[in-house]
Each structure stands twice: as structure tokens, then as C-alpha cells.
Image (spheres, helix red, strand yellow):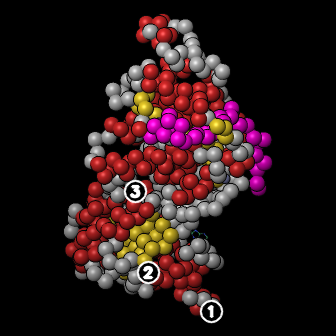
């Protein structure tokens, strides 16, 4: 005790060292803690692994009374409580998986003031007499973890979070701190509106993850590309491969295993004990690849994930950031690798068009989609595009993404683009890229003859360029919104109004040259 109190440090620093064993605060932790200890409300945005927990754990120990931590994930709660108890902190959780005796014990301790941190799921807090109980004890603060769950437009929306606004009414004067690693501007505003009415301070940390190298490539033969990527650059290392469909996760895991890469599948349809078993193995063992749907990842804290690969486009740029953010939490070099093609863009554009959402929501979805496609198609450094999504301006170049390391060449594609667009128009705006390109290339096939497309003025006007180039042009025209999926949903393309100035020659078009998937030298391990 004496050794601690004789240090000329603030009480927060003393707790940091004495309880958690760390000598320095990271990033904005010190400011946040000071603000909350002083009774202020706070919105804390920090990337995964940034150290959000201490921002409420230390104030919990410095303020009198019990700190109530609202968290949506039982597994996460249990981990935290276990860790805190090991550090000698009086922490407990209340959740549905608890035996009644243990619950009764915790409730007793709550009344006798023997708990410093109480972890609880939102529905538990709202649908029980706990609110009343808390009104009779001293509450040090409310911490709302994973606060983005309040956003109805986000992928982790939890309706219970909307009701957490009542905390402010029921417990005026008790500081509230909302924390998240997911926050574009809009989500940020929603968190403020719903969870932090009043004048909460915002603490926004940089979302850059400098040790993650980003690479986005063209999808050709995805399995082989993935295998090559793992063999060349991540042999024997842990990684996550995200796929869209449950079936794909199992097929690809099986296939990797037959190729000598130990892999497991994970998706929401797996039998729960098997799913838990796969997750536990991934966390415990070294060098396992988890092939998963997005069901995998939230709350997974494995520091040495060396790569996150995407074989399908994620739903949003934000989801991409979250998913790739699971790589390299230990700060050592890691990679985020993604391959995509025209089909992916088509699917994603189609989802946007078909959405039943109201106008405002649809416009937001559209913006999200453009952000994702912009990130994929950019010829510049990837970091500014990614971080702009979090309202952060990053000058770049970062030197640690594919475009910085191998700048893509661009070419004047206005003329081929016009030819392709005309051909889409002449063929009736009902056919997919393959057929349109067949017409451009003057192919002689059944479908073309049947439709009389060999008599069109655009038949055979594209023989000067190889098919791969036409595919690249079609993909980028779709990505940039000059082309769009036809509303019939038969896989056809049609013109978007945006292509008029291009067709009239009022504007040009520069496109990036697609490279075959680059194969940089095997990475040298940083010890
Ligand atoms: P987040 O919730 O933001 O993802 P955590 O709170 O789980 O991050 O912290 C990530 C890791 O960093 C944990 O292992 C934590 O103990 C460690 N950590 C947090 N703050 C510090 C610090 N000031 N010094 C050293 N390690 C820290
Ligand atoms: Zn870069």
C-alpha cells in the first residue's frame, strides 16, 4: 500500500499500475478516465484492441458504488469478469446462464456494497426488478459496451439497446459512458441521440491499424488464389476466411484440409456444441484457419490472427473494417486480403435496388454501397478511403497496402466504355456482361444468331481488345454506377442516367488496369 501511495502519480495511474499492472495509459485513456471519474458522460470510439475496457473499469474503482456494465455478449462478460477477479477486482455478472444460487449471491453482494463492477445483458437490466434494486444502491456509473448495437441500420442491431435511454431518466447524475469500435458518423449520432442525451464529450481515437496490410484483388479462381495466398505468405499461421454462404464455409474448409491447410468451418447453422468446439480450438491452437460466415468474430479476442481473407464482398465497408480488424491485434504485421469480381458487384448493387426500405434508409444503403465499391476500385492508397468512412482524414500514402506498393496503372478507357455502353443499349438492356462482350467480340453462337445480334451495328466492334479487358471495363462501369442491374433480376445490365455525359463525349473515363493477382515476395517475419 505504502509503495503505491508514495508515488507522485494521479490516483488513476496508481490503479492502472497496482490493479492492472500497466505503467502507461494508451491513447486517450487518461483523459477519458478523468472525465468519467469527474462525473461526465462520454462517447468513446476506439478501434478493437485499443483498450476501451479500462476506460470504465478504472473509474469504476475510483468512484463510490457499483459500476453497471451493459454488454450484449455473455461470453465476453464471462471472460472479463474472470480476468477482473484474477486481478483482485470485485466483479460479477448477471445473465441467463447463471445458476439461481449464484444469482442470489450476486444480488446480495450488490446490496451490501461488495461489488465494484456488475456486468449485465441489456434485456436483463430492462426486464427485471434490477432497475428498482439499483435505485436503492449507490451506482458509480453506467458503461454501455458495443454501443453501436443501438443503430437500426447497423448489422448488430439489438432492439433492447433502444430502451437503454431510460437510464438517463431513472438515474440522473450518474455518469454514462458508451463505447464502440464501430462508428461512422451516422452511427455516432444515433448513439448520442439514443444513449447519451445531453452534452456528452466525444473521445475519438484514430481507427488506423498501421500493422494491417490491405490487398484487394480480382477474383479469378478464388480457391486457388486463397490457397496460394496462405501457402506463400501465411503457412502455419492462424487466419480467418470469410464467405457468404454456410455451405461455402464447409466446402472450403474441407478443401483446405485436403490441401494440407488445417481448417475449420463456422456458421450459425452448425450444431451449438460443435460451433463452440471449433471456436475454442481456433483460439487455443496455433496455425488453424477458420472458414466462417459473419456469425464468427464478435468478441473473439485472439491476438495472433495473421490474416483475414474475404472470398465474397462484405456487406459494407464498416463490416469489412470490423472483420479485417480481427487480424493483428498483437500489433505485429498482418494482412487483410480480399478478392471480388463483377458478380459480387452485381449482387450487391441488386440488393441495394431491391431493398424494401424507405427512401431515407435506401439512400443510406446506397451511400454505404458506394463507399465499399469505392474502396475496392480505388487506384490510390486504400487507407484514406477506409478511414474517411470513420470521418477521419488520412493523408497517405501509407506504404502498407497493395496500391502503395504496386501502384496500379490507369488507362484512358472512354472509347471502349462508350462501345460497351452502346452495345448494352443495342442489345436491349436485358443481357449480362458475358453476352454483351460476346457481341462486341463478334462471336458466332446460337444465342447471338437467335436474337439477331449478329446484325447489330455493335457486333464485332470490340475485337481489338481481349475479353479480359472488356470484363474489366464492364466491372468498373458497374462499380462506378454507369451500368446497373436490370430490374427484372435476370442478371441483365442496363444503362444508368449517369452514363449520358460519357456517351455524349462530354466527359472522359480513366479506369484502372487489372493486374493478375500480385504475388509479392514472402513476407519476412518480424520477431
Ligand atoms: P477493446 O475493448 O478496445 O477491444 P481491450 O480493453 O480488450 O480493448 O484492450 C485490449 C488489450 O490491451 C487488453 O489485453 C488490455 O489489457 C490491453 N491494454 C489496455 N490498455 C492498456 C495499457 N494502458 N497498457 C497496456 N495494455 C493495455
Ligand atoms: Zn497505402
Residue 175 falls inside the magenta stretch: no
Name which residue lies at 55% across and 54% down: 386
- Main secondary structure type of the part rendered in magenta: loop
Residue 77 screen position, x and y as percent: 42, 61
Label 2, secondary structure: give it: helix
Label 1, secondary structure: give it: loop
Residue 210 screen position, x and y as percent: 65, 59
Distance Cα–Cα, label 1 vs label 3 = 38 Å
Query: Which residues, given as a range, are shown in magenta?
Result: 498-527
Judged by depth in the image, the label closer to the viewer, 2 or 1, is: 2
Looking at the picture, does residue 246 appear above or below residue 190?
above
Classify mark 1 as within 8 Å of ligand 1 or not, answering yes or no.
no
Distance Cα–Cα, label 3 vs label 2 = 24 Å
Q: In front: 53, or 358?
A: 358
Name which residue lies at 44% across and 9% down: 452
Q: In front: 451, or 76?
A: 451
Residue tagged 3: 73
Looking at the picture, does residue 303 appear above or below residue 20?
above
Distance Cα–Cα, label 2 vs label 1 = 21 Å
Indicate left or right for 119 with 457 as reference. left
Judged by depth in the image, the label closer to the viewer, 3 or 2, is: 2
Local packing at callout 2 (Cα closer than 10 Å; few below 14, some 14-19, many 20+) is: many
Residue 318 can be seen in this image: yes
Name which residue lies at 68% across and 34% down: 515
Local packing at callout 1 (Cα closer than 10 Å; few below 14, some 14-19, many 20+) is: few
Q: In the rendered image, which quarter is residue 75 located in? A: bottom left
Which mark identifies residue 170?
none
Residue tagged 2: 36
Residue tagged 1: 8
Q: In front: 46, or 462?
A: 462
Q: Are marks 1 and 3 in contact (CB under 8 Å)?
A: no
Q: Are marks 3 and 2 in contact (CB under 8 Å)?
A: no
Amino acid at each position: 500500500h505504502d509503495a503505491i501511495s508514495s508515488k507522485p502519480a494521479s490516483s488513476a495511474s496508481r490503479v492502472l499500475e497496482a490493479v492492472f499492472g500497466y505503467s502507461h495509459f494508451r491513447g486517450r485513456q487518461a483523459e477519458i478516465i478523468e472525465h468519467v471519474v469527474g462525473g461526465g458522460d462520454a462517447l468513446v470510439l476506439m478501434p478493437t484492441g485499443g483498450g476501451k475496457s479500462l476506460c470504465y473499469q478504472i473509474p469504476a474503482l475510483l468512484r463510490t458504488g457499483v459500476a453497471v456494465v451493459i454488454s450484449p455478449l455473455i461470453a465476453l462478460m464471462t471472460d472479463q469478469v474472470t480476468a477482473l477477479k484474477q486481478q483482485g477486482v470485485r466483479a460479477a455478472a448477471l445473465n441467463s446462464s447463471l445458476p439461481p444460487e449464484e444469482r442470489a449471491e450476486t444480488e446480495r453482494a450488490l446490496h451490501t456494497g461488495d461489488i465494484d463492477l456488475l456486468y449485465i445483458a441489456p434485456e436483463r437490466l430492462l426486464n427485471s426488478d434490477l432497475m428498482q434494486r439499483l435505485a436503492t444502491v449507490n451506482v458509480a456509473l453506467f458503461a454501455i459496451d458495443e454501443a453501436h448495437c443501438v443503430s437500426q441500420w447497423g448489422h448488430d442491431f439489438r432492439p433492447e439497446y433502444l430502451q437503454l435511454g431510460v437510464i438517463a431518466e431513472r438515474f440522473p447524475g450518474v455518469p454514462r459512458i458508451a463505447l464502440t469500435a464501430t462508428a461512422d458518423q451516422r452511427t455516432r449520432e444515433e448513439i448520442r441521440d439514443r444513449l447519451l442525451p445531453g452534452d456528452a464529450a466525444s473521445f475519438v481515437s484514430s481507427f488506423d491499424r498501421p500493422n494491417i496490410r490491405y490487398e484487394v484483388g480480382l477474383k479469378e479462381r478464388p480457391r486457388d488464389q486463397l490457397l496460394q495466398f496462405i501457402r506463400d505468405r501465411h503457412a502455419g499461421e492462424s487466419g480467418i476466411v470469410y464467405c457468404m454462404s454456410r455451405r461455402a464455409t464447409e466446402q472450403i474448409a474441407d478443401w483446405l484440409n485436403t490441401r494440407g491447410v488445417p481448417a475449420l468451418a463456422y456458421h450459425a447453422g452448425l450444431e451449438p456444441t460443435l460451433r463452440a468446439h471449433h471456436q475454442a480450438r481456433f483460439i487455443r491452437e496455433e496455425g488453424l484457419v477458420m472458414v466462417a460466415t459473419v456469425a464468427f468474430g464478435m468478441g473473439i479476442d485472439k491476438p495472433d490472427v495473421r490474416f483475414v481473407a474475404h472470398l465474397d464482398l462484405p456487406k459494407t465497408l464498416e463490416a469489412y473494417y470490423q472483420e479485417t480488424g480481427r487480424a493483428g491485434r498483437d500489433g505485429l504485421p498482418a494482412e487483410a486480403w480480399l478478392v471480388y469480381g463483377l458478380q459480387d458487384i452485381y449482387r450487391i448493387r441488386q440488393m441495394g435496388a431491391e431493398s424494401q426500405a424507405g427512401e431515407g434508409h435506401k439512400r443510406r444503403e446506397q451511400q454505404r454501397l458506394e463507399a465499399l465499391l469505392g474502396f475496392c476500385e480505388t487506384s490510390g492508397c486504400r487507407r484514406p478511403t477506409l478511414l474517411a468512412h470513420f470521418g477521419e482524414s488520412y493523408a497517405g500514402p501509407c506504404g502498407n497496402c497493395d496500391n502503395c506498393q504496386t501502384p496500379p496503372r490507369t488507362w484512358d478507357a472512354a472509347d471502349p466504355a462508350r462501345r460497351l455502353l452502346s452495345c448494352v443499349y443495342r442489345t436491349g438492356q436485358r443481357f449480362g456482361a458475358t453476352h454483351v462482350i460476346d457481341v462486341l467480340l463478334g462471336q458466332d453462337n446460337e444465342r447471338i444468331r437467335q436474337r439477331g445480334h449478329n446484325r447489330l451495328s455493335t457486333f464485332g466492334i470490340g475485337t481489338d481488345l481481349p475479353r479480359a479487358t472488356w470484363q474489366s471495363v464492364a466491372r468498373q462501369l458497374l462499380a462506378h454506377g454507369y451500368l446497373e442491374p436490370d430490374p427484372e433480376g435476370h442478371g441483365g445490365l442496363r444503362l444508368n442516367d449517369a452514363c449520358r455525359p460519357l456517351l455524349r463525349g462530354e466527359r472522359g473515363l480513366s479506369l484502372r488496369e487489372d493486374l493478375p493477382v500480385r504475388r509479392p515476395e514472402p513476407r519476412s517475419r518480424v520477431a
